[in-house]
Image (tube, helix red, strand yellow):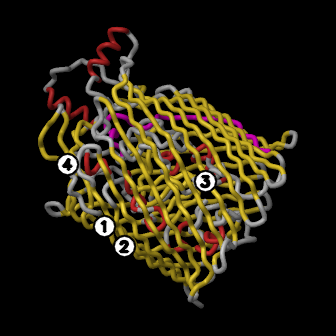
Amino acid sequence: MRHRISLAAALYGAAGLPFAVATPGDGAAPGPIEEVVVRSHPLSAEGLALASEILDGDELDRALASSIGETVGGQPGVHSANFGQAASRPVIHGLSGPRVRIMEDRIDSLDVSVTSADHAVTIDPFIADHIEVLKGPSTLLYGSGAIGGVVDVHTGRIPHARAEQFLSGRAEVRYGDNEDRRTASARLDGGAGNLAWHLDGFTREADPYDIPGYAESAAVRALEEEEEDGEHAGEEEVRGTLPGSQLDSEGGAIGLSLVGERGFAGFAVSTTDARYGLPGGHGHEEEEAEEEAHDGDHGYETPTLDLEQTRIDLEAGLTDPLPGFTSLNVRVGINDYRHREIEPNGEIATVFDNDAVEGRIELSHAKVGGWSGALGVQLTDRDFSAIGEEAFIAPVDTTAMGAFWVGERSFDRFDLEGGVRLETVEVDPSAGDERDFTAYAASLGLVLPFGEAWSLGLLADYTARAPVAEELFSNGPHLATRAFEIGNPDLDEEKALNLSANLRYAGERWFLNTSVYLNDFSDFIYETPTGAVEDELPVFVYAQDDAEFVGLDVEVRYTALAWMDGHVDVSALFDTVSGEVDRDGDDDLPRIPPTRYGLGLEGHWGPATFSVEHTWVRAQNDIAEFELPTDSYRDLRAYLGVEAPVAGTTVTLFVQGRNLTDDEQRQHASFIKDYAPMPGRTVEAGLRATF
């Protein structure tokens, strides 16, 4: 389901109170325009001017995957950069890594997934009520780490309102044939009087998945054959199954809130444990490990990653806290994270620790000079260390403090949105000099409704991002990226002017959502090759130059058929982005997603829900000097679910297929796309019960 959410609605939701937002076309025949409930996300999407997506309901059920990146990667303008089944971060309008912030209920994930592509995001999609994607700069609310966008997973782990019944819940089990994947998840919500509680848990096991052909791409195999000149002819090549793509994870949470007439106060404690393989020839000892594996007749062996995280979340909301103010929300997340990278022989190669705290206070005010809005402060402290043979950065402590205001004013024919933010960042390494940064952000947007169902949003943002510790102080082999990385302690703040126009039509049968954008960066931070080789790896250094991203997202839906107990919608999707850096002229940036087209058919008929989606991903030949091109591929997916009432419980049986054409799929945004393709044909079946 795609929505844009008004600032007024989101401001009301800042206190944690339910707020229904009705979209145009209420009362029409069933179709793509539905009602969404904003539960607790203050200033969500900064109003109509910023493009956003919300996955919930049936669409979220169909999209669910083992990682956040794969779950949201089918949305317009959003792609995925996978590193096996467990580790996958989203790419928004060509930007990823430290430029895209991943959050759980408005607080950062607090893991180390930004540090390296092979580190998993510790938020499991199966716990989500809904997932919100803000496509574009969101630095006003969430700091410089959101210069490219935000993915926020709303869990409901801290209840905001009294429970409507003593006990309600949802449970699901599913099985996938490709990798023998077994997944189970459940959540319970309830309460009595002023006490509300929540409980959830999940478990997932999957073997290495099957692939249509070779693990290495045709481009890599041709290059190796040319370089080796037949020296290793006849050696066995990996095909049919991707070594290191196994996954085993579990987690859960308990939450409790005291709810009154004017607000609530609550907490949640959650844990995540995961063990997963690292595909793509992750370590220096790969060849030695393979030889040992062959000698022992155990097949290919790869390194694994064993992580554990304990997280405590605190939240309180209050309506009418002070004269002139409508709501107050306080949110704190405290995290204890550790993972170990383990070689095939069982030796612990590297240990990563990340102790982090993030807090934010938001105070919404009544209209002042016609402007309604909110003031806020945000504090983040991160104590990070990596110890071991693959530690490419020394321990470092990062502290960020930000203050912001965002607001909206309505006129007769249009709305204005604006905001400012000031942020200071201190990066203090255990070895080296401390660096201090100041980042400013400002935004001005205009929303112009016209006709019966049209709206035009225009947005201009000035944003800045402080360099992260990895960009400043890296100095060593980074095997996930197959590079010896050298940071630059003299980096300045990265700055960008972002312009976007969003055209939307929401009628009874037609829905159109189009976004065109330009992100003009100065002092853009990126890695560039030096031509040197260290530890058998090419040496890359962090540098700064001007860069430009230009792109277009288009989504169209049409309700072709509608009747009393069903409807059929036809949809189309298109997105494209280019990214260039002005180094010696205009050079293509690496890992920019290729152009994508999609057609879909979805609907329901009585108790049945169904969908068919066919996506074409074009080849990517606009590549950086150290990249290889990526071939085109297609992705055919289908879903069928049938629900029935059983003893007061709604039970849904479903079956879905992914990559039904068994194409070789390689995501150009992935660091290991030439060594680890996506899974081949996969059929999944499951049962879901809600009560």
Cα separation, mark 4 vs mark 1, equals 20 Å
User: Decide: marks 3, 1 in contact (CB < 8 A)?
Assistant: no
Q: Which residue is mark 2?
A: 462
Q: Amino acid at mark 3?
A: His
User: Which residue carries the number 3 mark?
Assistant: 154
Tag 1: Cα neighbours inside 10 Å, few (<14), some, or many (≥20)?
A: many
Whether pointer 3 and pointer 4 mark residues with C-beta atoms closer than 8 Å, the reply is no
Q: Residue at x 60, y 41 (%)?
A: 270
Q: Which residue is mark 4?
A: 541
Magenta region: which residues? 670-691
In the rendered structure, find residue 495 and report the number of the disc placed on it.
1
| Circle 3 Cα neighbour tier, 10 Å, few/some/many (<14 / 14–19 / ≥20) | many
User: Helix or strand or loop: what does disc 3 sit on?
Assistant: strand
Residue sitting at x 67%, y 35%: 686
- Say whether disc 1 or disc 2 marks the residue closer to the N-terminus: 2
- CB atoms of marks 2 and 3 within 8 Å: no
Residue 522 in magenta?
Answer: no
The N terminus lies in quadrant: bottom right
Looking at the rendered structure, the kind of residue marked 1 is Lys
